[in-house]
Image (cartoon, rainbow, N blue to C red):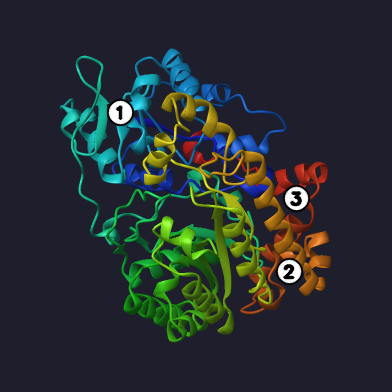
Amino acid sequence: MRCLLVNLRNTGARPNWAGMFFPFGLAAVTAVLERDGHELCTVDLHHEQICCDRDLDTLASIRPSLARGRFDAILFGGVFFNFEDLVLISRGVRSLAPDSFQVIGGNLATSTFEMVLQHTSIDCVVRHEGEESVSLLLAKMAAGEEWREVPGLAYRDGEGKPCCSGTRPYLEDLDAMPFVSRAPWNFQAIRKSFSMGTPGRYSAVLFASRGCPFSCLFCAPLSGKKIRTRSARNILDEIATLKERWNIRYFRFFDEVFIGDRAKIIELCRLIKQEQPDIFWWCQTQVKLVDPELLSIMASAGCIEIAYGIESGSDLILAEMSKGISRELARQAIEMTWSVGIVPTLSLIAGMPSETPETLAQTRDFIISLNHIHWTMVPQIGFILPIPGTRLYGVAREKGLVADEYTYLLQDMACRDKYSNPVNLTAMPTAQYVAEVNAANRAIKRDYFRKHPLTYLMSLCGFNHIRWKIAFQKFAPSQIRPLCESLLYAVVVKRFFRAGRIIGRFLFVTPPAESDL
């Protein structure tokens, strides 16, 4: 079948070049469809939005692809909060390509499939993990068979009402899946979107496992409660492929909880030291899963940073969030991580119903007490956002903060993220709530830069973007260009709009992939 894959704009991303990201879910689906022999074209609306000097006309960006010929299926995906974008695009595509079968997947589409089917021209929603469901869906359509029997789908019944085809079991053998397909998704450019704290190398996002066993109130992982892990050999093979083809030396594991099995992490570290000793890597995990010995092994295998979802420095708020951790446990994990030479990164959010000026002060003081650590990014408190499908979203609806779900999706979420325009679940007036969070963030930053004046001076010109202590470790001639480009990115592209536009185009705008022509 001939398929067009469209990555929607991520309106919750950081602005301009800092908001570049790799559409991992769609890339995983792309790999499966390539395996199945389908003819594919891709459009990355998020990438185009960043690269253009004006607000993107999304339908105009899709029209050239549609003009090249008829598509049997058009598949949408990506991390998006702008529901209106999906409504307008799907309806526009329906008018331009009325016979094309429209499919969408991802977290938000899974949790709001009824709204998607009621208000867009989407024909089918692929719920939860999409690779095998999409593969079987297109196989059924190509053979002229009944596709509605495929598990894991949502669609309209004969009366036009949303219904589901049941639940597809989660993939158990992740090694059986092909490596994600990166070339069609601007990876030549996206590998140069150097994250804060980069060692000055091209980077790639990958997953070592899927699933999260924890039950945070504000989260509803797409990949289920059970952690399913790729073998260490399979992970090493992908790392080797990325190194050889794309000169990648910095790998960012975006698992909800990195592997989750101590023995498997140790095995992976052993193989990295044996076979890939010249790489750096980043991961995120839960503070209760680390210990000094494990952290030392990870550091010796090239781990330079671990992200922890601390969320709050108040035990009251942590309990309300169902985090399953305490302030003291978080402190111990952070200190252990720093002591072995790995930089901890902290995620913090405020706005639970029990949040008060006192609990915010506890979070502020907790971070200030840890400001002897040389953070990659100074920890800052964001505003919590109720996402459909989470228990917190139910709390917001009970409080009357989501009076109309369609309006919330269409308007409110489009202009809200964890940094601005909060949905106020607290008992504080919104103005006070915002002011308290902003004051806490200023106090944290002010204290940190007072303790680290050299870091402050480096931040003024962007030099703090690079981890200079490790930039020349494991160095080879092939890393000269990435290091120079990372410096250019940090000092100019992210900081000076006009010059950044010119240089950013040189770094990040690539010719269309062969599959787009």
Residue nearest the observer in this picture, 374 or 92:
374
Q: Is residue 34 visible?
A: yes
Q: In the rendered view, does 158 fall on the left or right side of 508? A: left
Q: Nearer the viewer, mark 2 or mark 1?
A: 2
Q: Residues within 10 Å of mark 3 (few under 14, many from 20)?
A: many
Which amino acid type corresponds to the residue marked 1 in the rendered image?
Answer: Cys
Measured as percent of width and height from the top left, residue 252 is found at 51, 63
Q: Residues within 10 Å of mark 1 (few under 14, many from 20)?
A: many
* Mark 2 vs 3: CB contact within 8 A: no
Which amino acid type corresponds to the residue marked 2 in the rendered image?
Answer: Tyr
**Gap between marks 3 and 1, in whole Å?**
40 Å
Query: At 52% from the left edge and 21% from the top edge, which residue is drawn?
Result: 63
Q: Looking at the picture, does residue 188 appear above or below residue 487?
A: above
Q: Looking at the picture, does residue 479 appear above or below residue 383?
A: below
Which amino acid type corresponds to the residue marked 3 in the rendered image?
Answer: Val
Q: Residues within 10 Å of mark 2 (few under 14, many from 20)?
A: many
| Mark identifier at residue 448 | 2
Q: Looking at the picture, does residue 116 appear above or below residue 256?
A: above
Measured as percent of width and height from the top left, residue 364 is found at 64, 63
Q: In the rendered view, does 219 fall on the left or right side of 128? A: right
Residue nearest the observer in this picture, 27 or 368:
368
| Mark identifier at residue 493 | 3
Dot 1: element: strand
Q: Is residue 484 visible?
A: no
**Gap between marks 2 and 3, in whole Å?**
25 Å
Dot 3: element: helix
**Gap between marks 2 and 1, in whole Å?**
50 Å
Residue 431 quadrant: top right
Q: Earlier in the sequence, mark 2 or mark 3?
A: 2
Q: Looking at the picture, does residue 386 appear above or below residue 197?
A: above
Measured as percent of width and height from the top left, residue 326 is found at 45, 69
